Amino acid sequence: MDMSQLKQLDPYCYTVPKRPDEERAEVRLYGSRPLLETMDEMVLTQITNVARLPGLVGPAMTMPDAHWGYGFPIGGVAAFDPDEGGIISAGGVGFDISCGIRCLRTNLDLPDAVEAFPRLADELFATIPAGVGEEGNLRLSPHELDQVLLGGAEWAVKQGFGAEADLAFIEEHGKMRGAVPGNVSDLAKKRQRGEMGTLGSGNHYLEVQVVEKIYDPKAAQAFGLHEGQIVVSIHCGSRGLGHQIGTDYLVSLAKAASRLGLTLPDRELACAPLKSPEGQEYLGAMNAAINVALANRQILTHLTRGVFARVIPEARLSTLYDVSHNTCKLEEHVVAGRKRHLYVHRKGATRAFGPGHLALPLDYRAAGQPVIIGGSMGTGSYVLAGMAEGEQRAWSSASHGAGRAMSRKQALKRWRGRELIDELRGQGILIRTKSMRGAAEEAPGAYKDVDEVAEATERAGLARRVAFLRPKVCIKG
Amino acid sequence: MSIDYRYFDHEADIGIEAEGRTLEAAFANAALATFAIMAEPATVIPERRVEVAFEEADAELALVTWLNRLLALARLHGVVFNAFELRREGDRWEGAAWGMPWRPGADRGTEVKGATLTMLKVEQTAKGWRVRCIVDV
């Protein structure tokens, strides 16, 4: 990104001064100078487009891991007030609605598990349906699927997938309210028939990791983490149903926008006023997809526990937290000293409520919400905690991943999947995948430096580092 | 129909660009480009035929609808496609795709979640038609 067009507001926040004839809200780009310098120029174009949408409250923002997306940039955050003509945008949520990460802590330390890693890798790979075209064992009737759309992880727990105790550590207590199954097309529902309890492909993964470093001992204690501990992270979303809702509404909202007189700087921003029938219809469908994602991660949690029980019978896995990335949620925020109800779009960004927030489980209320920054399969991931400053700076939002630094096309030219997997095995990281192409596309070198993203997230006042997780076993689609 | 497609850079996803003597042929090549991300076309036997039909007046939105309809049908039938045919009469588009079920153990590519409206373009060229968009993976 050409830094000469930016104005630095503080060491980790930049803006783009408006031209005199330009009608838009402020934009804010969070991150370090080196991260912003390597960002694609399109990030700026896309977030500036978001700043032109009606009913926007405060600035349109990007997180430190932002990269070029479609409609909104990945790492884009924007809040809208329905009473001021605010909109909801399918392009502001994305195709993989509520894609997110479930983090499980175990009662194992590295010496308890290290010899079992090869068998864990093989059994997880055999048990977790992963990769394009792969289906799960669960087949649901149309009525049962509607119950998933309404009940999310709570439905899954009632079916015997996991424990009631998991729900307290999932956003929305595992069940997104406001889901309207009738707003989800038959095609979307049919696509989900064989996809409950599947991982998907691309950047989705299931990793067995070790806590390599603790940054914040107090918060780590609250989250039940210590150095040398084994944890598991599951990254996936709402599968075919979410993809189809994205597909259905991207086109219908793009058409609705022009019908409703909204002039969009980019058709991909496909949106409708929150108070319009079209906006409400998408909101109900999107909430249903959030529930599918929550149920999906709950089922995968259950499958993972089953594998651990077979391989290491004394293992116990409890949910640390479950975060969603691609959402639009109604939240209360303080604007100029006044509480307001805003619809916050986070596309490739994590909710990061600070200490004291009433939505947090009691165990975490003093520390702040766990935030998980998923890194590449060769580097590592971070657990962070939401900060009080994040509320005013970014509606309590933070980074969600390392963020790509290189296109998939470039990565395919540079790496071979087999060689990469062998190289990582040499570093003590076991990869299991059905796709050599996918492995090459997901090469660690194709991602930004996750350490820099996590540090910038902390220094920008969005979420502070609690622990660094090093991958040991990685199941890819 | 001659095969004519390529990929272009997009930071997170994949850009596809296809050409054809006719608009329909360009659309078919765009479909091939999309499915080639998920499976090497040469390894797919076109043994199963699935029909596609939709209505769309806007040619650009028709491209997105065509690709997304194919992705959904592939998922519903548990198949991967490698051959495509499309006809247009006014706003009505009718076609078919051929493919086969996923073989256990075969190397797979990356799942395409959907075709987006980003960098979406349908344009006439001296040789015929060129179409492009970003697909989300």
Image: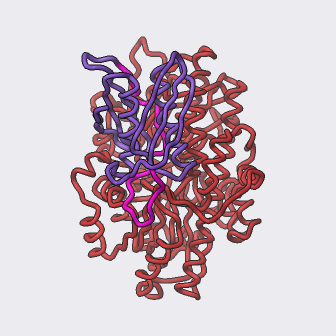
Chain colours: A red, B purple
What is the residue that sits farthest to the front in this orientation? B47
Location of residue A70 with respect to A108 vertically, above or below: above
Q: Main secondary structure of the magenta part?
A: loop
Whole-percent x, y for residue A164 in the image: 74, 68
Magenta-span inclusion, residue B121: yes
What is the residue that sits farthest to the left in this orientation? A414
Location of residue A46 with respect to A141 vertically, above or below: above
Q: Is residue B58 left or right of residue A292?
A: left
Whole-percent x, y for residue B33 in the image: 35, 40
The structure residue drawn at horizontal position 61% and vertical position 24%, both measured from the top left corner, is A55
The structure residue drawn at horizontal position 30% and vertical position 53%, both measured from the top left corner, is A446
- In the image, A165 versus A142, the foreground residue is A142
Whole-percent x, y for residue B75 in the image: 54, 49
Whole-percent x, y for residue A128 in the image: 53, 68
User: Over which residues does the magenta segment extend?
Assistant: B100-123
Numbered circles on residues, count: 0
Residue A388 seen in the figure: no
Residue A191 seen in the figure: yes
- In the image, B75 versus B120, the foreground residue is B75
The structure residue drawn at horizontal position 41% and vertical position 37%, both measured from the top left corner, is B31
Q: Is residue A76 left or right of residue B119?
A: right
State which quarter of the image contains the N terminus of chain B: top left
Quadrant in which residue A110 is drawn: bottom left
- In the image, A440 versus A290, the foreground residue is A440
Magenta-span inclusion, residue B116: yes
What is the residue that sits farthest to the top in this orientation? A21
- In the image, A357 versus A92, the foreground residue is A92
